[in-house]
Image (cartoon, rainbow, N blue to C red):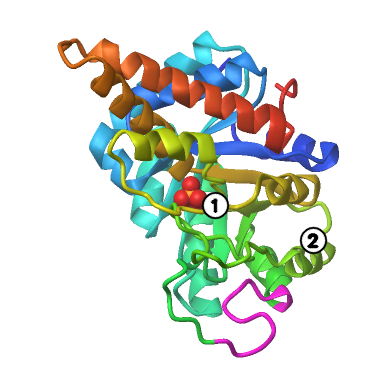
Amino acid sequence: MPLVTTKEMFRKAYEGGYAVGAFNVDDIDIMQGVLAGAARTNSPVIIAVSEGALKFIHPAYIREAAKAAAEENDIPIALHLDHGKNPEICRACVDNGFTSVMIDASSLDLAGNIAVTKEVVDYAHPRGVVVESELGAIAGIEDDLVVEDKYGHFTHPDDVVEFVTRTGIDSLAIAIGTAHGAYKFKPGQKPQLRFDILEEVQQKLPGFPLVLHGASSVPQDRLEIFNRYGGQLPEAIGIPEAMLSQAAKMAVCKINVGSDIRICYFGAIRKAMAENPGKFDGRTFLGPARDAVADMVADRIANVFGSAGKA
Ligand code: 13P
């Protein structure tokens, strides 16, 4: 089937109480691993490409590889721009065959965020492409946070209706305590998310799909392999899987995973290189790495997000 938007995926996910994984791909190998995991579990899937990855792989290669994947696999596949920083990059992706774009103008004030997001929606919608935008700050743990009220830097539920109505977006990324990268919490800190904010947002926007960024769970077995073979991510700590499952049962319809992919992929490469010192055929190293990505993606889908069998 051709590439699809996330519209129908999210409608079914909302009704079914599960979430669709958006997996960050940095090269075509990783993309193949992600798709193998999704196909194995018969799940819809979102291929997420950041601006950096877009430049690294080249837009035409991503587009053609994703199209080929969609033809080969009988599952719904969306091609999504992750964290587009300005309308220009979003427009370029709309013109380049992406079926979904994210505009991230969350560093602007509410009025500025609305104006920039609406500009992207006005371009994308007539061309059949859906738009995600972000409200609130999805911080890193080291960011200095100025807490003004009980919502702090998180998504303020009072803003969401105005934001969604005035922009016309299709999904909303919310900040409830997740963070990008392998360190979501400080060592010793108890992982917690603001489910109270998620609930308030959900009540204000009934039926509207929400998105969770920074949602890698940093599985300990994968981290152990990565570190054992020379990687250095001591005490990396992710979002507990039970919390991701809880969010997926609520209004969260898309869960973003990037760091877990990298830990799996490069952990497997490190291991294969250490175990095969005399080999110099890339397939010796990249094959197991691709398989490790597929296994991890299949595990997220089947055991955490709940989208297995929903293709
Ligand atoms: P992680 O770093 O938790 O994988 O988050 C990825 C992400 O949200 C990309 O937008």
Task: Give the distance between the C-alpha atoms of the residues marked 2 and 1, in whole angstroms.
Answer: 24 Å
Residue, x 54% and y 28% (percent of image)? 296
Q: Is residue 191 above or below residue 96?
A: below
Residue, disc 1: 238
Q: In this view, does 115 lie above or below 129?
A: below
SS majority, magenta: loop
Looking at the figure, which quarter contains the C terminus? top right
In reply to whether residue 156 is colored magenta, the answer given is: yes
Residue 113 location (% of width, % of height): 51, 71
Residue, x 27% and y 11% (percent of image)? 283
Q: Does the residue labelled 1 lie within 8 Å of ligand 1?
A: yes
- Tell me how many marks there are: 2
In reply to whether residue 280 is colored magenta, the answer given is: no
Residue, x 31% and y 40% (percent of image)? 54
Residue, x 40% and y 20% (percent of image)? 290
Residue type at the position of mark 2: Gln
| Nearest-to-viewer mark from 2 and 1 | 1
Judge left or right: residue 256 versus residue 155: left
Sort mark 2 into few (<14), some (14-19) or many (20+) by Cα contacts within 10 Å.
Answer: some
Q: Is any part of residue 33 visible from this angle?
A: yes
Residue type at the position of mark 1: Gly
Residue 110 location (% of width, % of height): 55, 77
Q: Does the residue labelled 2 lie within 8 Å of ligand 1?
A: no
Decide which of tag 2 and tag 1 comes sooner along the chain: 2
Q: Which of 278 and 111 is in front in this view?
A: 278
Residue, disc 2: 202
Judge left or right: residue 274 versus residue 119: left
Q: What stretch is highlighted in magenta?
A: 147-158
Residue 112 location (% of width, % of height): 48, 76
